[in-house]
């Protein structure tokens, strides 16, 4: 195995062995606290531009397979694991994980103390980092650190166009037809589409630069903004399009990045979290039911709402309820408009490989569509 170095922008370094492709990569380093679902993490477009640290010690045990992909490729900028499995043992496996990492030129590192790394990031916050393997690992540390610090920070980055579809795509409903949904693809996951079509919804996916006129052109029964990477403060066009959609009275649902853009459309600010929420074990309170859900997260930004839990929209869209809140740090995890048919959540109800506590939110979308149709 070839030598590899993980170097953080604050100068801390970890030495291990190469994993996946050999070479160098830089990005924002984040940690994901999931014991399962590494393939879903790797293929989630929301991780574009990020070096992902897996806190679970053993990675690669079950290989990879086409069915579990959340998109058509791996998006992470780099990959960090402690103990990479030397063999694959799962009847669903189609190939080893290292082969898939090499296919998409993902530079990784294995054999480092990921617990120490995670505790460091948990204390000082996420930052830029680089992974250097092979000949790149032999360069002077000062030179490597310059490469890391030359990397664009996540704050201020617009990545939706990078991960979005380039053309309009249609997906037909299954079972009894309920209605139609127009999706603005900001990094949409396959499981989101699957959850909608399984509920009788025809889905049309639009590129990230689609206008409100594009999204409403086929008179959909609802509009959906997907998850995705980057800073929501850079998405002025998508926010203005959403304001048009809210004014039209068309039901709206947003997940993750979509939640942040709804917040901005309603007139609230967004901000960058110190280390973000990533993984499949975050407790969230649904204030509309009083239930606590175990949820999957992947976000480094959040909506800022002062006061509440019920406040007025600064942009004039009526009353807004902070419907969901993190029980770890009180971060806003969901918004529900009380005077217009719009709601969103910061976490992932479509989570694969789980948990599925919040899957009911897709049923709320169906209910909003049926209510709108019943009023027409």
Image (cartoon, grey):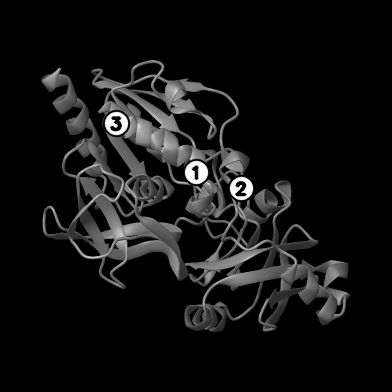
Label at residue 193:
none
Kindly identify which residue carries mark 3: 247
- Which residue is identified by label 1? 236
Determine contact: label 1, label 3, CB under 8 Å: no
Q: Residue 183 placed where, x, y %?
A: 42, 31
Given residues 342 and 27, the one toward you in this image is: 342
Q: Is residue 189 visible?
A: no
Q: CA distance from mark 1 to mark 2?
A: 27 Å
Q: Describe residue 141's horizontal placement relative to residue 282 as left or right.
A: right
Position of residue 323 measured from the top left corner of the image (x, y, whole percent): 20, 54
Q: Residue at x 53, y 30 (%)?
A: 207
| Residue drawn at point x = 60 percent, y = 72 percent | 127
Front: mark 1 or 2: 1
Expressed as whole percent of the image width and height from the top left, the position of residue 303 reads 36, 58
Secondary structure at numbered mark 2 = loop
Earlier in the chain: of badge 1 and badge 2, it is 2
- Residue 19 shows in the view: yes
Q: Earlier in the sequence, mark 3 or mark 2?
A: 2
Q: Is residue 159 above or below residue 150?
A: above
Q: Quadrant of the N terminus?
A: bottom right
Residue occupying image coordinates x 35% and y 45%: 262
> How dense is the environment of label 1, judged by Cα within 10 Å: few (below 14), some, or many (20 and up)?
few
- Asked which quadrant contains residue 33, the reply is bottom left
- Residue 257 location, x and y as percent? 43, 49
Instruction: Quarter of the image for the C terminus: give it.
Output: top left
Instruction: Classify 10 Å Cα crowding around label 3: few (below 14), some (14-19), many (20 and above).
Output: few
- Circle 1 sits in a helix, a strand or a loop, which is it? helix
Cα gap from disc 1 to disc 3, whole angstroms: 17 Å
Alpha carbon of mark 3 to alpha carbon of mark 2: how far? 37 Å
Q: Which residue is mark 2?
A: 74
């Amino acid at each position: 195995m070839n030598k590899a170095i993980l170097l953080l922008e604050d100068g801390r370094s970890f030495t291990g062995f190469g994993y996946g492709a050999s070479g160098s990569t830089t990005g924002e380093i984040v940690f994901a606290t999931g014991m399962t679902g590494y393939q879903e993490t790797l293929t989630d477009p929301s991780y574009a531009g990020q070096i992902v640290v897996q806190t679970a010690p053993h990675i690669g045990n079950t290989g990879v397979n086409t069915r579990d992909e959340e998109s058509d490729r791996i998006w992470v900028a780099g990959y960090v694991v402690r103990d990479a499995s030397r063999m694959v043992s799962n009847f669903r496996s189609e190939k080893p994980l290292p082969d898939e990492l090499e296919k998409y030129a993902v530079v990784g590192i294995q054999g480092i103390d990921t617990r120490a790394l995670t505790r460091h990031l948990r204390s000082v916050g996420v930052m830029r980092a680089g992974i250097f393997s092979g000949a790149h690992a032999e360069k002077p540390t000062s030179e490597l650190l310059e490469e890391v610090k030359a990397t664009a920070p996540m704050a201020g980055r617009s990545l939706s166009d990078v991960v979005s579809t380039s053309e309009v795509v249609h997906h037909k409903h299954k079972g009894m037809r309920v209605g139609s949904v127009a999706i603005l693809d900001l990094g949409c996951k396959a499981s989101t589409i699957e959850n909608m079509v399984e509920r009788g919804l025809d889905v049309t996916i639009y590129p990230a630069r689609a206008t409100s006129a594009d999204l409403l052109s086929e008179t959909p029964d609802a509009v959906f903004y997907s998850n995705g990477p980057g800073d929501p403060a850079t998405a002025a066009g998508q926010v203005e399009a959403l304001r048009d959609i809210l004014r039209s009275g068309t039901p709206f649902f947003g997940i993750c990045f979509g939640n942040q853009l709804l917040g901005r459309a309603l007139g609230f600010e967004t901000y960058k979290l110190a280390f973000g929420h990533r993984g499949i074990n975050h407790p969230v309170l649904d204030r509309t039911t009083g239930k606590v859900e175990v949820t999957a997260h992947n976000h480094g930004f959040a909506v800022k709402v002062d006061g509440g839990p019920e406040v007025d929209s600064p942009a004039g869209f009526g009353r807004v309820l902070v419907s969901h809140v993190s029980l770890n740090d009180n971060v806003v995890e969901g918004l529900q408009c009380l005077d217009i048919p719009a709601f969103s959540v910061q976490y992932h109800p479509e989570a694969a490989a789980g948990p599925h506590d919040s899957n009911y939110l897709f049923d709320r979308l169906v209910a909003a569509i049926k209510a709108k149709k019943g009023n027409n």
